[in-house]
Image: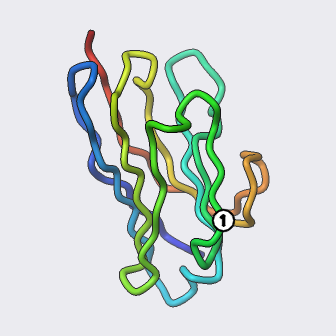
Amino acid sequence: QVPLVESGGGLVQAGDSLRLSCAASGRTFSSYAMGWFRQAPGKEREFVATISRNSISTRYADSVKDRFTISRDNAKNTVYLQMNSLKPDDTARYYCAAGPYSDTRSAYDYWGQGTQVTVSS
């Protein structure tokens, strides 16, 4: 098990920035790639970004590329999602996940409870 706890969500205006954090418990954090996904009301949970175990590789959804940055600190067992130039379409509940390096939701083994991000126009 890899308990994951997200934080950093909130209500912001279009154009603002937010940084989400996801803290993991245990000693196995560095064994997993980490991903961020999001789910808006009435929609499927969709891929946002992923980062490899050693931070060498990252991948982003086209909708967030050049606006969002994923990073991790293995010493702190934490993965981050820096979100800039936020748009109302970014409104969703954001989840972090631990698993293999993948943009596929079903590939991930462990999930947090999510943190809500709401972007007003």
Front one among 57 and 108: 57
In this image, 94 relative to 97: left or right? left
When the figure is inspected, residue 35 is found, relative to residue 89, above or below; the finding is below
Q: Which quadrant: the N terminus?
A: bottom right
**Residue sitting farthest toward the top:** 121
Residue at image x 50%, y 47%?
95
In this image, 59 relative to 68: left or right? right
Residue at image x 37%, y 49%?
82
Q: Which quadrant: the C terminus?
A: top left
* Residue type of the residue flagged with mark 1: Ser
Residue at image x 62%, y 62%?
110
Q: Position of residue 30 (x, y in %)?
A: 57, 82
* Numbered disc 1: secondary structure: loop
**Residue sitting farthest toward the bottom:** 27
In this image, 64 relative to 9: left or right? right
Q: Residue 11 sits in which quadrant?
A: top left
Q: Position of residue 79 (x, y in %)?
A: 44, 65
When the figure is inspected, residue 80 is found, relative to residue 85, above or below; the finding is below
Residue at image x 40%, y 23%?
91
Q: Quick one: label 1, few (<14), some, or many (20+) residues within 10 Å?
A: few
- Residue carrying label 1: 57
Q: Position of residue 35 (x, y in %)?
A: 59, 55
When the figure is inspected, residue 45 is found, relative to residue 95, above or below; the finding is above
